[in-house]
Image (spheres, helix red, strand yellow):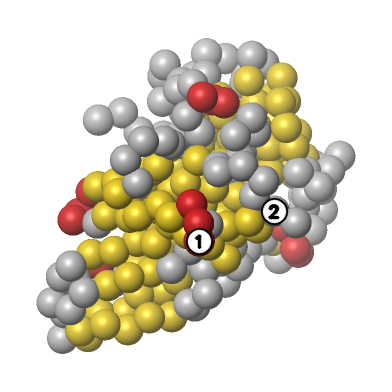
Amino acid sequence: AQSVTQPDIHITVSEGASLELRCNYSYGATPYLFWYVQSPGQGLQLLLKYFSGDTLVQGIKGFEAEFKRSQSSFNLRKPSVHWSDAAEYFCAVGPRGGNKLVFGAGTILRVKS
Amino acid sequence: EPEVTQTPSHQVTQMGQEVILRCVPISNHLYFYWYRQILGQKVEFLVSFYNNEISEKSEIFDDQFSVERPDGSNFTLKIRSTKLEDSAMYFCASNPRGLVSHEQFFGPGTRLTVL
């Protein structure tokens, strides 16, 4: 069955530490891949996307993500986390030939000072 | 920068009442969507809309739901007879090119509370 998995429900990191949020997908063909961020009471903001080409994509706010076909993964990374990065992060996939996004369950990031 | 807007930000209604959630997509976008997020759960696709008709809908989008683009700017979601389980955050999204890119721009959401 097609699915998107974010195995970590909560992650806590210290300010200034590096961050990696995991995302795995299960689809027949490589879908379009996205990371969104949702701050409390806010909507969904696109951080970055992968359609094709270079497997390391850069996004806003210093985030990057790497697509690994062999692992069906699209993990989000940031080398140094800021307190303002505390939010919920959603991985989403858009099946090629489809017309919707399928979201993972989300990972809540807490940043401790 | 253009953005998707939604009104109201919070809607409280009694069970069985009709509600209409409103969205103004980005002006040159062609595809429009509604998603919902029940508190503490993942964001779920409801419906997509293109060229004045539904292009895809989920199992959630039953006969109680309808969408409309009544004019050149608004995109609405109607729930005819609300249930307690319809309480959720409803997000509108739009996409400039649809199938080609899937890049969807989301509005801030409408929180619907059904009492």
Q: Is residue A28 above or below residue A24?
A: above
Q: Which is closer to the viewer, label 1 or label 2?
A: 1
User: Compared with residue B71, is residue A99 higher up or lower down, i.e. above or below?
Assistant: below
Name the amino acid type tagged 2: Gln
Residue located 57% across and 26% down the image: B99
Q: Is residue B6 visible?
A: no
Q: Chain of mark 1?
A: A
Name the element at disc 2.
loop
Q: Are marks 1 and 2 in contact (CB under 8 Å)?
A: no
Mark 2 nearby-residue class (10 Å; few <14, some 14–19, many ≥20) = few
Q: Which of B64/A20 is in front? A: A20
Number of numbered labels in the structure image: 2
Pinpoint residue A75: horizontal percent, then vertical percent: 39, 62
State the mark number for residue B56: none
Q: Which residue is mark 2?
A: A2
Type of amino acid under label 1: Gln
* Residue A76 located left or right of residue A63: right
Q: Quadrant of residue B105?
A: top left
**Residue closer to the observer: A87 or A18:** A18
| Quadrant into which the N terminus of chain A falls | bottom right
- Label 1 belongs to which residue? A71
Residue appearing at x 84%, y 43% in the figure: B62
Asked if marks 1 and 2 fall on the same chain, the answer is yes
Q: Position of residue B30 (x, y in %)?
A: 52, 19
Q: Is residue B42 left or right of residue B93?
A: right
Residue B108 position within the rendered picture, expressed as x and y whole percent measured from the top left: 42, 47
Residue B34 pos. (x, y %): 61, 40
